[in-house]
Image (cartoon, rainbow, N blue to C red):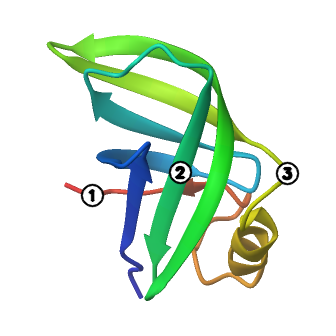
Amino acid sequence: MAVKLELYVDGSPVKILNISETGVRYIAKDELDTESVDLTLQCQGQAFRLRGRRAWGESVGPSHTAVGVAFQEEGDLSKLKNLLAEGTLQGGDRTRDLDFS
């Protein structure tokens, strides 16, 4: 069963590439070079409020940046970890590669 995930970074929608218990990789338009970000992950009618630290970013095309964010231990991170651990999102190594094409 496919699970629809929507991610917002500092209020702007982004495309998730993969997600794990420790962080998320996504593509954004015109990514700001900030160290700390506020994330909202919408999943199965729930909103998870998270904080993260930008670990890296690289240009992947005109006005698009791939970004890696490490989650900080606050907000709804423990709830997200529980969702990942119960197998609602599928993936053998607890890293979820997601296809949103």
Which residue is label 3 attached to?
73
The amino acid type found where label 3 is placed reads Glu
Work out whether mark 2 precedes mark 1 in sequence or the reverse, and give the earlier one: 2
Q: Which is more foreground, mark 2 or mark 1?
A: 2
Q: Which residue is more in the foreground, 9 or 90? A: 9
The amino acid type found where label 1 is placed reads Phe
Work out whether mark 3 precedes mark 2 in sequence or the reverse, and give the earlier one: 2
Q: Is residue 55 above or below residue 73?
A: above
Work out whether mark 3 precedes mark 1 in sequence or the reverse, and give the earlier one: 3
Can you tell which quarter of the image residue 86 is in? bottom right
Label annotation for residue 39: 2
Q: Position of residue 13 (x, y in %)?
A: 29, 49
Q: CA distance from mark 3 to mark 2?
A: 13 Å
Q: Is residue 85 left or right of residue 8?
A: right
Q: Which residue is more in the foreground, 7 or 61? A: 7
Q: Position of residue 51 (x, y in %)?
A: 67, 47
Which residue is label 1 attached to?
100
Can you tell which quarter of the image residue 58 is in? top left
